[in-house]
Amino acid sequence: MKKIILYTFLLMISYGFGQELNLPVFTQYLADNDFVISPTYAGIGDNLKIRANGLTQWVGIKGAPDNQSLYGDFRISDRSGVGVSLYNDKNGNTRQKGAKFSFAHHLILDYYSKQYLSFGVSYNFNSFRIETENFTTNYDAPIVDPYVTDDRSVNNNNFDAGVLYRNKGFYLSFNANNILKKDIDQFTGIEPSLLLNYQIYSGLIISSKADKSVEFEPSVYYQMFSSDRRSSTDINFKYRKYIGSNDSQDYYWAGLSYRFLNDQMFKPLNLGPMAGIMKSNFYFAYSYQVTINDLSGYNSGTHMITIGIDFLQGISNCECTKSPIR
């Protein structure tokens, strides 16, 4: 009985996140893809950067969330960039698909001290569907609800906006996601219409004085939902090592992420290692997150794989679009 209660509670949490009109953020952004966090990163770095993510959550629990996403951003001028992200999310008998189209513009605050300011905006489209054709009877539910007789789906549109400040290796971004109120789901009538959430992402890239090919990158990611004020924080640390010649873009990295609710700092939600490599413009990363609560006995953790490619490299005439990663 306890297992059934925990499983039901788990799916309720998943359903809540699944209606946010965005793919839930785990550690996708730590795979050297800050564009996951904010549209302000569109166009920073190589001309065209593509990342594909596959995430399987709570392995071992039937019907647990499983999703795939694709991100791409590129520079369209010396100071502007565009990006697109697509995702597909499966959670039990619920399906959610969406797309996000982003634009960013980058400004130089001070050329000599390398201070830059970026602004970004995204348009989001989301489609949510309940697969009623999969509804079957069982011991706990011997009768299917007679009111569920047709396709249950709803589409929503929304916008994100953000600002990013950079100073050499330091970065700080602030984002407001899902600015507009969401259309209420007429099938339930109990879900919140306000999905506005705020995100703060900050970190520092530190070059080792002993070895110029080594970098350290501590970072913090904070998210707060306006509807019920729930919030969480990620504390991350990454080690990056460049390989090859002094001007080589190849590197490998390893890191650790720690996520907790802000009213339970010493009771982590997730904790896990991650690692990745960039070689000849091809990218691969793996992340593992273990759930540290009563649910840990019923699943073997969350697994995420990222693959990507950077190509059509071009040198911008503006320092504001150069990546802090060498």
Image (spheres, grey):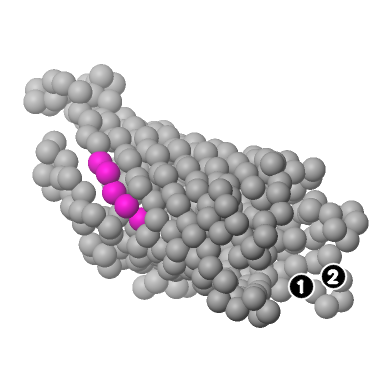
- Note whether residue 286 is visible: no
> Residue at (21%, 49%) from the top-left corner?
182
Would you say residue 43 sits in the magenta stretch? no
| Residue denoted by label 2 | 212
Q: Quadrant of residue 256?
A: bottom right
> Residue at (61%, 60%) from the top-left corner?
321
Left or right position of 249 against 318: right
| Residue denoted by label 1 | 207
Instruction: Tell me which secondary structure the magenta stretch mostly adopts.
Output: strand
Q: Quadrant of residue 231?
A: bottom left
> Residue at (28%, 57%) from the top-left corner?
179
Residue 163 x %, y %: 44, 67
Please state which amino acid type lies under the numbered disc 1.
Ser
Which type of secondary structure does the marked residue at label 1 adopt?
strand
Residue 167 x %, y %: 61, 76
Please state which amino acid type lies under the numbered disc 2.
Lys
Residue bounds of the magenta highlight = 156-160
- Note whether residue 157 is visible: yes
- Residue in front for this viewpoint, 164 or 104: 104
Residue 230 x %, y %: 31, 65
For marks 2 and 1 on the same chain, the one whose residue lies earlier in the sequence: 1
Residue 67 x %, y %: 46, 37
Left or right position of 185 against 64: left
Task: State whether residue 227 is above or below residue 168.
Answer: above
- Residue in front for this viewpoint, 299 or 174: 174
Question: Do callouts 2 and 1 mark residues in contact (Cβ within 8 Å)?
Answer: yes
Q: Quadrant of the N terminus?
A: top left
Q: Quadrant of residue 18?
A: top left
Q: Quadrant of the C terminus?
A: bottom right
- Residue in front for this viewpoint, 317 or 42: 317
The crowding category of the residue bearing disc 1, from other C-alpha atoms within 10 Å (few below 14, some 14 to 19, many at least 20), is: some
> Residue at (57%, 52%) from the top-left corner?
77
